[in-house]
Image (cartoon, rainbow, N blue to C red):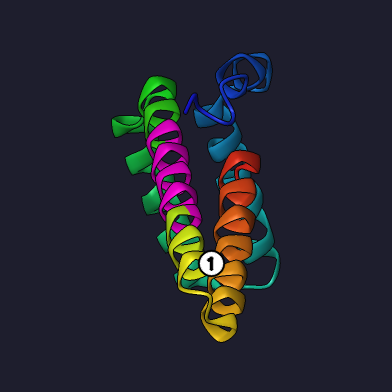
Amino acid sequence: MPPVFAWWPQMYAREIKPVRRKRQKSKAGIAIAENYGRTMKVHGLKKALSKLEKNCTDEELLQKHQNKIKDKENDVRKAEAELAEAKASGKEHKIVKKQNKLAEQKRELEKAVSGN
């Protein structure tokens, strides 16, 4: 089965770079925490930002995201196989259970693709 979301890397490449986006989110979080006087939160976010700037690359983030999508695609295939087995057994309660599981796996895959 070909990857469900093979188009994703091309779309992702056109977006703002992932490390830059993470950096922007961290800086926004720092500003909010400073505004509310949450010094421990500011300290933690600054530490995370420092690690991000030292150790994180766009390529690594892209690879991690692609791996997560592949894992979710595998989960969907497994759930589809389990549903087929349940249908073969003819037990209605198992079929419903496996249909629900497949729906949940598909939602998780969509969530992974969207980056949430």
Q: Is residue 106 magenta?
A: no
**96 in relation to 76, above or below:** below
Q: Residue furthest bottom?
A: 93
**9 in relation to 82, above or below:** above
The local crowd at label 1, few if under 14, some if 14 to 19, many if 20 or more residues have their Cα within 10 Å, is: some
Q: Determine the residue positioned at 35% across, 27% down.
A: 60
User: Which is more toward the observer, 59 or 109?
Assistant: 109
Q: How many marks?
A: 1
Q: Secondary structure at mark 1?
A: helix
36 lies left or right of 53: right
Q: Determine the residue positioned at 59% across, 29% down.
A: 5
Q: Which residues are magenta?
A: 65-80
User: Toward which corner of the image does residue 102 lie, by quadrant?
Assistant: bottom right
Residue 96, can we see it? yes
65 lies left or right of 16: left
Where residue 59 sits: x, y (%)? 39, 20
Q: Determine the residue positioned at 43% across, 52% down.
A: 75
User: Which is more toward the observer, 90 or 106?
Assistant: 90
Where residue 16 sits: x, y (%)? 66, 23
Residue 116, can we see it? no
User: Which is more toward the observer, 27 or 76?
Assistant: 76
Q: Determine the residue positioned at 41% across, 53% down.
A: 78
89 lies left or right of 55: right
Q: Which residue is mark 1?
A: 87
Where residue 9 sits: x, y (%)? 55, 19
Residue kind at label 1, given as amino acid type? Lys
**11 in relation to 54, above or below:** above
Q: Is residue 68 magenta?
A: yes
13 lies left or right of 49: right
Where residue 116 sits: x, y (%)? 62, 50
Secondary structure, magenta segment, majority class? helix
User: Which is more toward the observer, 46 or 91?
Assistant: 91
